[in-house]
Image (cartoon, rainbow, N blue to C red):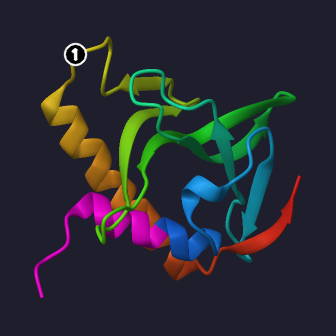
């Protein structure tokens, strides 16, 4: 059996966490996942990618600081829907956290990207999804 691409493995991990294909999430709705002793994960479907028309999701842990919600971290990912017997894929688009302030974007403008950052963020995404699974995050409710 051929080895799966990291984007495919990340898609499978996210699909398992969500309990449904990522592209099936409803827009304008927050999905919350909880594991005892850990920060909740909030997943939201954002507007589809302008360049590709593909679904975009936000995955985020939040904490409160001085009354404000802060990301710790938040990543946006683009979903490639499975077709023709191929596996679905997700690709990291951005990473941000509030403290210390960090904001990184893989594609700063159409047709340009940062290859090193792309590899780094997709590797982190895989690590984060494995960690969420090991922590036992489960769906709580849809807001």
Relative to 132, is 94 on the left or the right? left
Relative to 47, is 54 on the left or the right? left
Q: Decide whether the magenta segment is chiefly helix, strand or loop.
A: helix
Residue in the foreground of this view, choosing between 12 and 94: 12
| Residue 34 image position (x, y, % from top left) | 74, 69
| Residue 32 in the image: above or below residue 113 | below
Residue 132 visible somewhere in the drawing:
no
Residue 73 visible somewhere in the drawing:
yes
As for residue 3 lying within the magenta part, the answer is: yes
Residue in the foreground of this view, choosing between 62 and 113: 113
| Residue 141 in the image: above or below residue 67 | below
Residue at the spot 37% in from the left edge and 24% down from the top edge? 105
Q: Report the span colored magenta.
A: 1-13
Q: Quadrant of the N terminus?
A: bottom left
Q: Which residue is mark 1?
A: 111
| Residue 104 in the image: above or below residue 129 | above
Relative to 34, is 125 on the left or the right? left
| Residue 61 in the image: above or below residue 17 | above
| Residue 51 image position (x, y, % from top left) | 39, 22
| Residue 127 image position (x, y, % from top left) | 36, 63
Relative to 25, is 114 on the left or the right? left
């Amino acid at each position: 059996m051929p080895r799966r691409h990291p984007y495919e493995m990340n898609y499978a991990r996210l699909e398992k966490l969500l309990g449904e294909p990522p592209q099936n999430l409803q827009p304008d709705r927050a999905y919350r996942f909880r594991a005892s002793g850990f920060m909740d994960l909030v997943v939201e479907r954002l507007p589809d990618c302008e360049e590709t028309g593909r679904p975009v999701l936000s995955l985020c842990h939040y904490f409160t600081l001085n009354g404000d919600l802060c990301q710790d971290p938040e990543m946006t990912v683009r979903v490639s829907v499975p077709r023709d017997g191929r596996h679905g894929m997700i690709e990291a688009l951005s990473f941000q956290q509030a403290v210390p302030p960090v904001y990184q974007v893989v594609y700063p403008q159409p047709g340009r990207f940062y290859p090193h950052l792309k590899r780094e963020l997709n590797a982190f995404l895989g690590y984060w999804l494995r960690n969420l699974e090991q922590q036992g995050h489960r769906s709580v409710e849809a807001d």
